[in-house]
Image: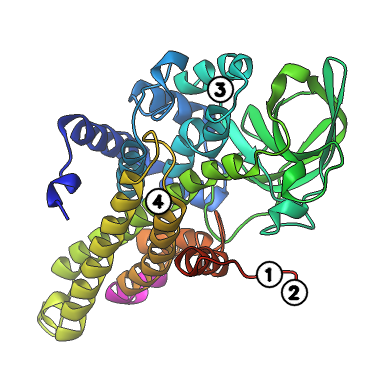
């Protein structure tokens, strides 16, 4: 393999510097955001736009920065590392990741021109609404329906675990159209906050990812313009391409948080003394440092490799990004736990970055595809056959 593929160009180095500076500017608020489970989302989005971090992969023709999946991964990694919080990643998620990605695969240029320029500029945030109370990983069983009635689309159903709800402005919603069962009946439509018949709920408090709400949507004869249809039924495979970007996002987020925990552990091990010498002179800590570094580097390799497989620079290949997310979720959890051990008693104290990062990366084992679903995806690709989950 040509190792030069992993050498960052001038533009990518500039992105990492901007993301690091931006993340560091919000780091003083990380503990408060975590404690209160509330963040100044609008202010953070606005400042990310000022830092040149919005709409990273949205094409220039729609006002975006025309960047690649690797550009996005680098921004997420370094913003999360600097802020030491999941929240840094979710701010970048809101203008580049799954919601905008679904819009980018649409054949409906009118809906793209209606929404993408504002998203790219950070004037609008976009969430993805897919998970339902009765259906999580079983996406093809979703029950939320959409019926086209003249110049309107009428939606009924419920969604939950919607990242950014009720804060975000726009909800890219997966729906069943025409009563067609299974994957063939699934399409997507854009719903604006404030649409008649749409009710937004705060949702549950999770053990990690504080500051970023994971709310609920209830559609009761909710009406939106017919022009808000992103895709008609029969495009399920194309729609799911956007979730490869979400898996890349989670991989990069885990990488950044693991690196943040490692940074804290190394600094602490240099300063903390026991028995008259720094703790990093004890072999047990020595080995933890080496193990953490190795896990981080392997995660970085797989994450960047997955980003480089992206079609048109925006949609990573399913196999590679599933491998990257599987590795990232496992490695980040282990790295953060080891960092907590290096800090000893302080590692268990709420407010210390490794403890917060540990709770954040636990979420990654479920969000964007569970560990078990990822293993199924990987094996199905390698063996050329899928398990019959309904068997």
Q: Residue at x 20, y 84 (%)?
A: 284
Q: Position of residue 255 (x, y in %)?
A: 34, 56
Residue 201, quarter of the rendered image: top right
- Which residue is at the front of the view, 263 or 63? 63
Nearer to the camera, 186 or 298: 186
Q: In the rendered image, is residue 16 in sight?
A: yes
Q: Position of residue 135 (x, y in %)?
A: 75, 57
Element at label 4: helix
| Residue drawn at the location 16% of the way across and 78% of the way down | 286
Q: What is the CA distance from the residue labelled 3 to the residue labelled 1?
A: 40 Å
Question: Are dots 4 and 1 in contact, CB under 8 Å?
Answer: no
- Marks 1 and 2, how far apart in space? 5 Å
* Residue labelled with disc 2: 391
Q: Secondary structure at mark 3?
A: loop
Residue located beneath label 1 in the image = 388
Q: Is residue 202 above or below residue 323?
A: above
Mark 2 or 4, nearer chain start: 4
Q: Looking at the image, how many numbered discs can be counted on the residues?
A: 4
């Amino acid at each position: 393999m040509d190792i030069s593929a992993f050498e960052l160009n001038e533009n990518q180095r500039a992105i990492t510097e901007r993301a690091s500076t931006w993340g560091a500017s919000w780091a003083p608020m990380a503990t408060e955001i975590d404690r209160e489970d509330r963040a100044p989302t609008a202010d953070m989005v606005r400042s990310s736009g000022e830092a040149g971090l919005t709409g990273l992969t949205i094409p220039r023709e729609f006002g975006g920065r025309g960047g690649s999946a690797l550009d996005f991964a680098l921004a997420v990694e370094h913003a999360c590392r600097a802020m030491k919080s999941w929240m840094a990643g979710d701010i970048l998620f809101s203008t580049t990741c799954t919601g905008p990605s679904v819009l980018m695969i649409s054949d409906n240029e009118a809906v793209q021109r209606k929404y993408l320029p504002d998203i790219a500029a950070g004037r609008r945030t976009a969430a993805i609404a897919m998970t339902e109370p009765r259906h999580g990983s079983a996406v093809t069983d979703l029950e939320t329906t959409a019926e086209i009635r003249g110049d309107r689309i009428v939606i009924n159903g419920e969604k939950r675990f919607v990242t950014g709800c009720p804060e975000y402005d726009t909800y890219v919603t997966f729906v069943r159209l025409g009563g067609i069962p299974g994957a063939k009946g699934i399409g997507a439509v854009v719903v604006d906050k404030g649409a008649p018949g749409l009710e937004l709920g705060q949702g549950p408090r999770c053990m990690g990812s504080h500051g970023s709400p994971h709310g609920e949507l209830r559609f009761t004869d909710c009406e939106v313009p017919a022009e808000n249809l992103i895709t008609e039924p029969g495009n399920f495979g194309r729609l799911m391409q956007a979730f490869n970007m979400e898996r890349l996002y989670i991989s990069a987020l885990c990488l950044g948080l693991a690196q943040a925990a490692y940074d804290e552990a190394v600094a602490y091990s240099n300063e903390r003394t026991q028995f008259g010498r720094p703790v990093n002179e004890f072999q047990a800590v020595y080995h933890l440092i080496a193990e953490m570094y190795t896990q981080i580097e392997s995660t970085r390799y797989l994450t960047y490799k997955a980003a480089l497989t992206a079609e048109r620079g925006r949609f990573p290949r399913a196999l590679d990004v599933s491998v990257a997310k599987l590795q990232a979720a496992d490695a980040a959890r282990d790295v953060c736990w080891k960092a907590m051990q290096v800090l000893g008693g302080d590692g268990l104290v709420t407010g210390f970055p490794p403890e917060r990062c540990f709770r954040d990366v636990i979420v990654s084992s479920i969000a964007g595809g569970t560990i078990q679903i990822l293993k199924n995806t990987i094996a199905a690709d390698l063996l050329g056959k899928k398990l019959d989950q309904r068997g």
